[in-house]
Image (cartoon, rainbow, N blue to C red):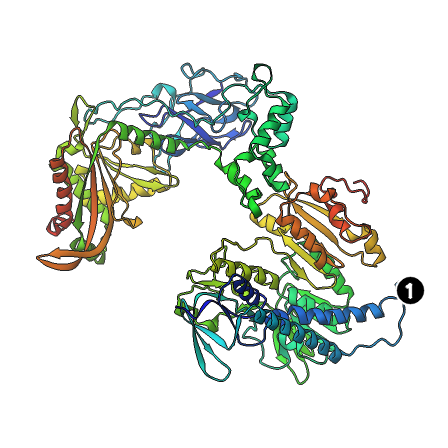
Amino acid sequence: MAQAVIFPKLGQTMEEGAIVQWLKQEGDPVVKGDILFEIETDKANLEVESFFEGVLLKIYVREGVTVPVNTVVGYIGAPGEKVPDQAPKPEAPAPAPKPVASPSPTPAAARVPVAEPAAAPAPVPARAPVPAPPSHPAPQPAKVPVPAARLVISPRAKTLAQSACINPARITGTGPNGRIVEKDVRAYLAASGYDALRITPAAKRLAAEKSIDILTVRGSGDSGRIMVEDIERAIRRKPVALSRMRQVIARRLVESKQTIPHFYVTVKADITDLMVFRSDLKARGLNYSVNDFVLEAVVLSLEEIPIVNSVTDGQTVSWRGDVDLGMAVSVDNGLVVPVIRAAQTLTFSELSAQAKALAEKARAGRLTPDEMTGSSFSVSNMGMLNVDQFTAIINPGEAGILAVSSGRQEPAVVNGEVRIRSRMAITLSVDHRIVDGAVGAQFANAVRSKLENIELWKSLV
Amino acid sequence: MQDFDIIVIGAGPGGYPAAIRAAQLGKKTAIIEKEALGGTCLNWGCIPTKTLIASAERYHHATQSATFGVTAKGVTFDYAAMTARKAEIVDKLSGGVRMLLQSNGVELINGTARFEGPNRLSVLQPDGTTRWLSAVSIIIAAGSDSAMPAFLPKDKRVMDSRAFLDLTELPKKLLILGGGVIGCEFACMAAALGADVTVVEMLEDIVTVLDRDVRRVLRKRMETLGITLLTGAPLTDIAVKKNKVTGTFKDQRVEGDVLLVAVGRKPNTALLDLARAGIKTDERGTIPVNAQGRTNVASVFAVGDLVTGSIQLAHAATQQGVTAAEAAAGLKSKVERICPACIFTSPEIGLAGLTENMARQRGIAVKTAVFPFSALGKAMTAGETDGFVKWVCDPVTGQVLGAQAVGCHATELIAEAALAIRNELTVHEIGNTIHCHPTLSEAWMEAAHAFHDACIHLPKR
């Protein structure tokens, strides 16, 4: 019997996604473990492997179409077997596939088996209660501007507008019911300085081909002549849908800035001694990044000042309990925030190892959705990007984020004398609804004093 | 206060037009030249070689016109007289350059320039004194010299093109190392005068910048002229004997009275002490510049052969020189992107814009349209039916992106193609432009029709 291939639910919060690429086509033989398709979720691209053997009989969901999780996207079965022409509704996936033999995904390779629908609500790991984050509307596909109503235009007028490479939507019609007639187009062309436009033959053909209104194009050629390059620029100006990752980033950042009253505290940590200590460790074969020290200092400070590791919905405030430390990692055309779970239970070397492993997975695009959700506080480090200071936007569901800038050698006053010291600006962004200025300052200074306390690090390494 | 607004280093085809343009724009201008006004092009390149080629063609026509009903007995040539004519033309043109510079008020300084800073030069003059100069902007137009690889024996029988042009007697047996443009031009000239010519090229074919179909025409004609073309392996065991130079190609022994080395040109940047002004060069010694010819040092421009990625043609240098002078004077000029190239082989070759090879390498989809001279009345009357013209077009808009012509007067024919490409014409405009009959230029119009399989003068395919 043919088995339905289900669009898998890969994280607790995942509601929908799109197939980026089918790696099998209708009619292709499939064995267990073959990668069927690659999907794009809010957070990452993942490969989905088959749990069935047979022939891919039908594909219902084409590449690039966003569908809810558990949608039937295709069927696998014996060659020639009959399958429905239309995909069954996701609520009632027709022939239920067999339960998955090994339910644990293989996150290391970020290859995920097709989940069976019944098992959809993945077990929630035991964790401190978290207030439900405000529900977000699913991101809408980018809207491409289209004429509001159907244009009423005579065939002759339409032909003239097309041959002139202009958009008739901006013309006022004088015919019956505002119909655009040929003389309206001519009047529009005369009024808009069309006759003075100069354009190369190839540019005009390209504009016609790509429906570019040449009245909107500025010419860069001799005496302002419109060249092919100018039309190509106009083509590139057309709206392009953001990737799902960028849409999610956009939605979350707007939500954060609109709902969380941010305030910021900047301090400068003197990391001169820390840098010496770090190179001493390196000489002993122990490699720690500056970021590792920052992460550990943040974990310790969050344990000391629990309100910064809390979250509010405006009515209640909840302590998050564990320090689930988010770590912003920039990836191609975006940003992901993998989470180090219960960071307060890890030794310094474990923390460092986890941070390194998660960053590598993030850059390889192999994080699973669950590895990117549920952080309680985040760190954004631009130290390697040569910046003096910056502020970060709080991830919704958290009370704060720490922005770490580049270490710099600069004159500093030490015991009443000017010395060259390495200093690094760290800026805390916090939710003012639950953290006031005094506490914010206390937290920023707690992180600073830890970074400057070499005796502390000697005890931790 | 600087001594000059603009100083140009080198009075070749890049430098002297730059100086004249700067003076036209009201700038106080000087030009420094260590040898002869007019540079390589005028003294040891374009002009002298074309003078000799003109003589060789005359001789060839005089002896090979029986099919035209013209026979001449006892035709001889005097190579010394040919070279004397060459010297006369060179003197005349060089004098012309001097007159032009002087009439524009450009100060001529004889000597070798060296950078002392971003705005300062020292000039070692022929009398041994050093003159110090400063300028708001400096344009480097010092050109290039033949590369003479170190493995070659140092002997007067092993020479570059410049030394070859000083010969007053044509070698009976000529061995040429390098099957590029220069090597092939000299090979055709000497073969037309009856010399026994062998060309050795390490690459798979001669003049590999050309598309294969163009090369095939050239190769066939050169072989008909009696030239031995050995390609695909290096010339080894090069040795100078008492009155000849010998070498080995694969297992074959080759020899000549002299060895002409034409393996490329190296930039004349070493003597300039560019580092003292902080001017960057790449690993080949050429200078990277922006679209205006400006180097990494804002006050310094570079034009011509010593610029990274330069096409190493006189007319390219001239356009770059004029652009740099205008940029130094604060105008927004940019270097032209379409630069036609001409090759004075037998038959001649012209090219402009994109070749099929380049399109393939860059992944650009193109459609070609070809018309052979064998189908053209004028070519038949001239007894020159070898070769063809070819448009390389955008398959959608028909825009002409590139052109190549191989055949009689191809170096003149390419001018029309360059105009069309630069101004973004399509095959439609070219096909609709009336061309004189009977002329060779009709081939461009016919080839444009070939884009749509609409040639009048080719049988239906």
Going by the image, does A41 lie left or right of A229? Answer: left
> Which residue position is annotated with label 1?
B69
Residue B300 vs A118, above or below: the answer is below
Percent across and percent down for residue B89 are: 69, 73
Going by the image, does A183 lie left or right of B15? Answer: right
Secondary structure state at the residue bearing disc 1: loop
Residue B351 vs B49, above or below: the answer is above
Q: Nearer the viewer, residue B347 or B304?
A: B304
Residue furthest out toward the left:
A415
Look at 53% across and 76% down and name the residue there.
B34
Look at 64% across and 63% down and name the residue there.
B232
Which image quadrant: the C terminus of chain B? Answer: top right
For the question of whether residue A454 can be seen, the reply is yes
Residue A445 vs A27, above or below: the answer is below
What's the chain of the residue with tag 1?
B
Look at 51% across and 17% down and name the residue there.
A86
Q: Residues within 10 Å of mark 1 (few under 14, many from 20)?
A: few
Which image quadrant: the N terminus of chain B? Answer: bottom left
Percent across and percent down for residue B26 are: 51, 63
Percent across and percent down for residue B374 are: 81, 52
Percent across and percent down for residue A333 are: 39, 39
Q: Nearer the viewer, residue B39 or B146?
A: B39
Residue type at mark 1 is: Gly
Q: Nearer the viewer, residue A114 or A373?
A: A373
| Image quarter of residue A377 | top left
For the question of whether residue B308 can be seen, the reply is no
